[in-house]
Amino acid sequence: MIGVNRQYLKQATWTISKGKFSTWMVGDFYWHGPTKFNISNKVVSIFCEDVDRIPEKKVWYLRGLRQHIWRRYRKIKGFIPFIGMDIVNSKIVFVLYQVGPKRSNLYLVLQSFMESEAHTNLKNRVHF
């Protein structure tokens, strides 16, 4: 790995794999993304969103977010979504890979989803 100091890498505390996607915990972060992926020759976009509080059903929430984003963007060539949840600082982190050129409106669509009725329904299902 280029540019990564290996002393800061940590092993996952636990991992759940179901189908083509996995959820795992490292430190204070829950992560959800594809089990197998290839990020070579891809451009990455990273976005953070503050949330009021962390849901009780964290894994369900991450799966719901990923499913929404996957359905909306799967036509982008090489699209790979990873979604993280910082349980200490109440943040959601979106790490989105794609084959260039970068799609410029990813952040606006993510923001609009976070304010949408679909996101409100997801939050109600996971006991926010």
Image: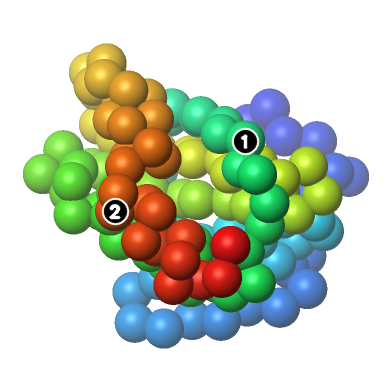
- The residue at the point 71 percent across, 45 percent down is 90
Dot 2 amino acid type? Ala
Tell me if I can see residue 25 in this picture.
yes
Which part of the image, by quadrant, shows the C terminus?
bottom right
Is 73 or 11 nearer to us in this picture? 73
Q: From the image, tell me which residue sits under label 2.
A: 118
Q: Position of residue 116 (x, y in %)?
A: 31, 42
Which part of the image, by quadrant, shows the N terminus?
top right
Tell me which numbered mark, 2 or 1, is placed earlier along the sequence: 1
Dot 1 amino acid type? Asp
Task: Name the front one of labels 2 and 1.
Answer: 2
- The residue at the point 49 percent across, 40 percent down is 94
Identify the element where label 1 is drawn: strand
Q: Position of residue 75 (x, y in %)?
A: 10, 44
Position of 8 with respect to 25 (left or right) is right
83 w.r.t. 95: above or below = below
Circle number at residue 50: 1
Colouring chosen for the image of the structure: rainbow
Circle number at residue 125: none
- The residue at the point 82 percent across, 49 percent down is 88
Q: Residues within 10 Å of mark 1 (few under 14, many from 20)?
A: few
